[in-house]
Image (cartoon, rainbow, N blue to C red):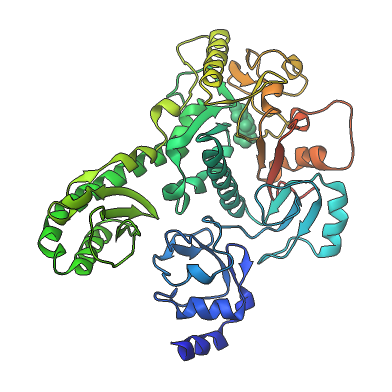
Amino acid sequence: MVMEAEKKMNQLQAEHVYVNGHQLSREELSLLQGCANPPPKLKPGCYWYDKDSGLWGKMGSLLLSSSLQTFPKRFRFGQGSTPNLPLVRQFFPSNNSSSPFPSKSITLTTKNCKGLLCNSSMAEESVEKLKPGVQIYESEEDLSVSLAKYTADLSQKFVKERGAFTVVLSGGSLIKSLRKMVESPYLDSVDWGQWHVFWVDERVVRKDHIDSNYNLAYDGFLSKVREWEEEILSVIRDFERWGKLSVLMSSCLPECTLQCVITSITSQRKWAPQVRRSPAFGGRGEWKEGDRWGLCVGGRVVATTMGMFALFLPFLFSFSALEGVPVPPGHVYAMNDALPAEGAADDYETRLKQLVKTKVLDFKPASEFPRFDLILLGMGPDGHVASLFPGHNLLNENQRWVTFVKDSPKPPPERITFTFPVINSASNIAVVAAGAGKSDVVRRALGSKTTSDLLPVEMVSPEDGEATWFLDKHAASKL
Ligand SMILES: O=C1O[C@H](COP(=O)(O)O)[C@@H](O)[C@H](O)[C@H]1O
């Protein structure tokens, strides 16, 4: 095995392989190629790896192999469960450039992977002009993968810290840039059940109207999460059918039974679930009271058999673990589309205040504004964010949480919107812009020149949170 791995190593240079943003050493490449189920035809490039599930894939693409079983234990990069992205340039205020939760000093990372947009002297020149927390990607595709990782990391952090993740969406192109969130590995690893989804602005139209930001997010994002629920339920239905067969086999050939169930599900689904034995999931020890069959999808246990019944009735499941999978409908806070603009803004603000009372939504006692965990902000080519447009008097609103506009320069004219005090109270703000159409406004917002009349996007400045800009190279082309 070792000799075989060494032969392969001669053909592939370890320094050309990155896993979760980490450049492999010779020893790590050897481990990878010698593990139980090595990736076939490994080539130079960037890969992601989830140590919990063993899932592995090419950065930005689907699964390659589902069981790098011996791989995780000795790998230094096996800390995170979500992929990092090849950055073209990263200007990140961090003491640790791989941390998703940056602190103050500016560092420039040009280390990772392909296609650097600039040579290092150009980059150092540019870093003088740029604000910290600006990430520039070779393509919108790379931006999208990185945005998903950033969002998934924050979700994990806040769910762990406060048992909920309050995330605010924009309309427009942001939803397309969020598409990687509803693909592997995030679709099955994110704790959607703890998500609470809001909108930073909404057009005063019916929810099923083509202009509705809810409608856009539903089609491009939320519906995917719910389809995922359907997938899991149908896998469980299959598992129930096959469970009867495993009754016959479980006493004498448990591993074989396991294989049967896996093969059954895998042949009918486009992704591979793993069925393991608990409590250690994967252990092969003797069956004892408390041991259960578990159905894992992407590392998450979605159903388990019930205790000792498992020996006889492995088709009896406890579905409790399922509850956390999709975003529950009650956690999706769409605007009330039966109300006119003013009433809809009042109603949304009242609902936010209730969520503060029930502690779903965090609150800043000093300023008396809500504190969202993450606001994902798109930006118009004119520099507007949310429905806060250049030169509009709503830019100075400092009492209301949610207000309305009836003369939006961009159709439709009637909208509701969060105000700047709410936006700037967030713990994290991602400003996302892709395409050459945004390059002038990006230059104005991030370039060195300052003007007295601030564009709305220039007013995005979290009071004690972090702002991170996600730009593709076209949006950043005039920096
Ligand atoms: O009208 C709106 O526009 C902005 C920007 O949209 P984009 O398509 O240029 O990215 C969006 O962020 C906002 O939510 C939306 O209502």
| Camera-side residue of 303 and 177 | 303
Q: Is residue 185 left or right of residue 283?
A: right
Rendered residue at 22%/62% (across/down): 287
Give the image quadrant in which the ligand numbered 1 is located: top right
Q: Position of residue 234 (x, y in %)?
A: 24, 46
| Camera-side residue of 310 and 383 | 310
Q: Position of residue 212 (x, y in %)?
A: 50, 25
Q: Image quarter for residue 279?
A: bottom left
Q: Position of residue 296 (x, y in %)?
A: 33, 54
Up the image or down, 406 lies above or below 461; here it is above
| Camera-side residue of 387 and 196 | 196
Q: Residue furthest front?
A: 289
| Camera-side residue of 287 and 442 | 287
Up the image or down, 62 lies above or below 153; here it is below
- The number of numbered badges drawn on the structure is 0
Up the image or down, 90 lies above or below 206; here it is below
Quadrant containing the N terminus in the rendered view: bottom left
Regarding residue 223, the answer to whether it shows in the image is yes
Rendered residue at 35%/37% (across/down): 323
Q: Position of residue 343 (x, y in %)?
A: 54, 8
Q: Is residue 306 left or right of residue 98?
A: left
Q: Is residue 279 left or right of residue 38?
A: left
Rendered residue at 80%/37% (across/down): 445
Regarding residue 473, the answer to whether it shows in the image is no
